[in-house]
Amino acid sequence: MNIRHSRTWATLAASAAVLMIISMVAFPNSHARAADGVTANEAKGMGISTQWRGSRGLVTKGADGKVIFLYGEVQPSVVCSPLQVCDIELQGGEVVRDVLVGDTVRWKVEPATSGAVGGQAIHLIVKPSEPGLITSMVVTTSRRTYHIQLKSHPTQYMPRVGFEYPEDVSAKLADVNARLEASTIPGAGVPAEQLSFAYSVSGSAGWRPTRVYSDGQKTYIQFPRSISGQDAPVLFVVSGGQNRIVNYRMKNNMMVVDYNIDRAVLVSGVGWKQQKVTISRGGL
């Protein structure tokens, strides 16, 4: 080969290498491809999806042998069998919009319902035509979207499948806490049957007490929660026709007075902005 040509080819090769390096620095993602033609971001996305689809997640037993998945934790994998049906039950009152199946030729999905009108639950009856099949199903409803993997086995299957919903657990916990709070008498460390609620409250104020009671030694004046962080009203005890200020302790929205009160007045503000509420025990 001519020496001049050799130098020319060497120069071109060096230029091409420099251009390749510049291209890789300027456009790194365009060269971040695996041997199978997948970019680094695509590989990362598929890894996240594979981890979600392949995780074991929480599977529990419900009534009548129902298999319960925690919604959203992982992709549920429902195993069905030819000549059998899998019943996938959705949440009561949930309205199904669309059902999309990857393999519509060898998998059949039919809807059914249960329950009273207004709270009916939708059931998806799934039937494979042969064993050894794997496909995916997407169900969109009025409340959420389900991504479910379907597998067929020669003999084994899940007759009933359902879901537990995290928001239901939170709602149940909030309801339990509300009921416990409503049944708990704050402040007094004695049973409720030993408390006296023989108090009447009259007058109008935004902080008007919601409950007044005594344990025989102390008097508890409970205000609305909105009073927390605000200045509490002044407490006057009526004795011998005179009003005298008494000391008390505030604990959140509870005013605790260290003795029994027969008659008292709560006052806040001055002049025409003054608000006054009267507390009386029994018929006093």
Image: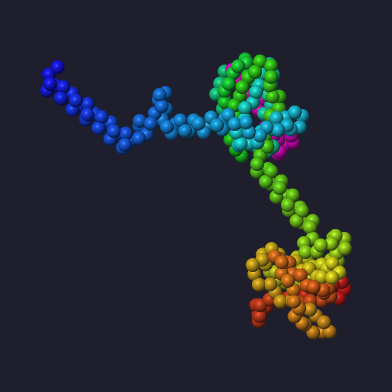
Residue 278 coordinates in the image, percent (x, y): 77, 75
**52 part of magenta stretch:** no
Task: Identify whether 183 is placed above or below 91.
Answer: below
Q: Residue at x 73, y 71 (%)?
A: 249
- Residue 208 in sight: no
Picture quadrant where residue 102 is located: top right
| Part of the protein shown in magenta | 106-125
Q: Residue at x 37, y 34 (%)?
A: 29
**109 part of magenta stretch:** yes
- Residue 55 in sight: yes
Task: Identify whether 21 is placed above or below 198.
Answer: above
The reply, left or right, for residue 264 in relation to residue 133 is right
Taking depth in this image into account, of 202 and 3 the one nearest to the observer is 3
Taking depth in this image into account, of 272 and 209 the one nearest to the observer is 209
Residue 255 coordinates in the image, percent (x, y): 74, 69
Picture quadrant where residue 251 is located: bottom right
The reply, left or right, for residue 102 in relation to residue 213 is left
Residue 245 coordinates in the image, percent (x, y): 75, 80
Q: Residue at x 87, y 63 (%)?
A: 194
The reply, left or right, for residue 115 in relation to residue 193 is left
Q: Residue at x 40, y 24 (%)?
A: 35
**Main secondary structure found in the magenta portion:** strand
Residue 71 coordinates in the image, percent (x, y): 63, 36
